[in-house]
Image: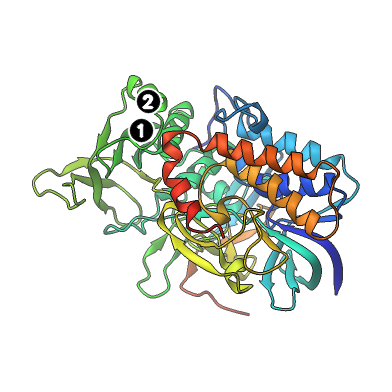
Amino acid sequence: MREADLVVIGGGPAGLCAAISAAESGARVLVIERNKVLGGQLVKQTHMFFGSEKQYASDRGIDIAGMLLNKLGCFNNVEILTETTVVGMYEDGVISVLHKEDVYYKIKPKAVVVSTGAFEKALAFPNNDLPGIYGAGAVQTLMNVHGVKPGDKVLMVGAGNIGLIVSYQLIQAGVEVAAILDAAPRIGGYLVHASKIRRMGVPILTSHTVKEAIGKDFVEKAIVSQVDEKFRPIAGTEKEFDVDVICISVGLTPLNELLSMRGCQMKYVPQLSGFVPIRDENYETTVEYVFAAGDATGVEEASAAMVEGYLAGLCAASKIGCTPDDFDERKSDYVKQLNDLRSGPVSRHILSGIEQIVI
Amino acid sequence: MRIEKHPILEFRRNKKISFTFNGEKIEGYEGETIAAALHAAGVKVLGKSLFMHRPRGFYCAIGNCSSCLMKVNGVANVKTCVTDLEEGMVVETQEGKGEII
C-alpha cells in the first residue's frame, strides 16, 4: 500500500489547478491521469477563452494547458502519474489504480480531489450508431490534435457554443459544414460565434432535429425535420443532406462513477447535466476528505472548472493540515472569480443547479 | 484525409511507421492513435457490435464510450482512440466481444 497526502484524480483544467493550489499550500500532491498527456480537453481547444485575465481569457486552450503544466513543474512536492487509471475508491479511503493495464496497486491518501470531468451525450435517432457519427469533442481531437479530417461534409447537431466553435474549426480545417441544427427555437451559444459562421454561408436551422441517418456501413445521408414547440417532428418538413459526418454536440454529462462508488451522496440536477455530488462551499462531498471540482460537479466550462479546481485544492490541502497564511484571502478571491464568471444571464441555469447541491 | 494547411495549427508529424489493418499494409505516424491513423487512411468501420453485428466507428475519442474497440496484436477490446500506433502493429476489426485469451 502506497501512502500519499493529497491525490488529485484527473489532470484536466480542474485537476491541474487543484494540484497547483494544494502544492502552493504546502501539501504533497499526487496527480493521477489516465491519459498519456496532461491537460484534459484543453489540448484540443484552439479557440480563445472568455472570462477575465485570471482565467486566461483571450488565450487559446492549447496554450493554457502548457501554462498550467509549467506552473505545476515549479513545485517539488508534486508527483504526476500518467497512463494510470483509478479503478476503485473504497469505504476505508483506499483507492486502487491500474497503470498501463498491467500494474495494479493501492494508495491510501489523506484526502482526494475528484476532477474526472465529463463526457459527451449521444442523441437518439434511427441509425445513430453508424460510423461517421461522432461527438464534437472527438471531431476536435481528430482535427486539432491529429490533423485528420473527420470527413468531407458535416451536419452539426447543436447550436450551443461547442457546436458553433467546432463548426468554425471544421471550416478552418477545410471541411464543408452543410448546416447547423438545433431543436431549440433559439441559438444556444454566443451570437458572436453564430454570426461569424452565418457570414461564412452556413445555415443555422433552429427548431430542427435529425430524423434519421442513412447509410449501410457509414453515414451517407441525414434526414432532418422541423420540430414543434414540444420537440415533435412536423411531418412534411423533412430535408435531406448529403453528408458523410454527423457531429453531435448536444452537451456533456459528468463522469461520476468514482464519486458514486465512494458513497458520496449524488443528485440528478438537469441544470448541471446529470448526477453530481452534494457538496459544501469548500467543494467537499458528503464523504469527509473527498472533494470534487470541475465538470464532475456539474457541466459548465473550462474557465469555471479551473477556478473550482484552485478552490477545491486549497480547501483539501487545508483539511489535511496545510493551511497557508493567506487562506481566507485566497478563498474569497476564488469565490469572487466564480461569482464573476457566473454573473451573466447564460449562467442563470447553472446557478439554479448549484443551489440544489450546496449544503 | 490529413489536414495539410491550417490557419492556427501546425502539425509536426513524426516518423512514418507502418502497420497492418486486416492484413493490409497501412502507413501512419508515430505519436498518433490507432483510430486517427486508420481514419486518415479512410477506414471508418472499426468493428461490429455485440448482438446485432452493426458497424461501429469511434465516437468520443477519450476512451470512454467503447465504440472503437479493436483487436490489436491479438489482444481484443483495445481502445484504439487512446492507444498509440506502433511500428508493425497488427490491427484487426473486432466482432462482438472479441476472443478473450
Residue drawn where x is 58% and y is 41% of the image: A304
Residue drawn where x is 35% and y is 53% of the image: A218
Res. A76 visible in picture: yes
Task: Say what amino acid the circle numbered 1 marks.
Answer: Val
Image x and y of residue A250, in percent: 39, 48
Name the mark on residue A197: 2
Residues A233 and A83: in front is: A233
Name the mark on residue A177: 1
Image x and y of residue A333, in percent: 69, 37
Q: Is residue A3 above or below residue A314?
A: below
For this orientation, the residue located farthest to the right is A76
Identify the image quadrant of residue A199.
top left
Q: Is residue A182 above or below residue B96?
A: above
Res. A81 visible in picture: no
Q: Residues within 10 Å of mark 1 (few under 14, many from 20)?
A: many
Task: Say what amino acid the circle numbered 2 marks.
Answer: Ile
Residue drawn where x is 48% and y is 31% of the image: A169
Q: Residues within 10 Å of mark 2 (few under 14, many from 20)?
A: many
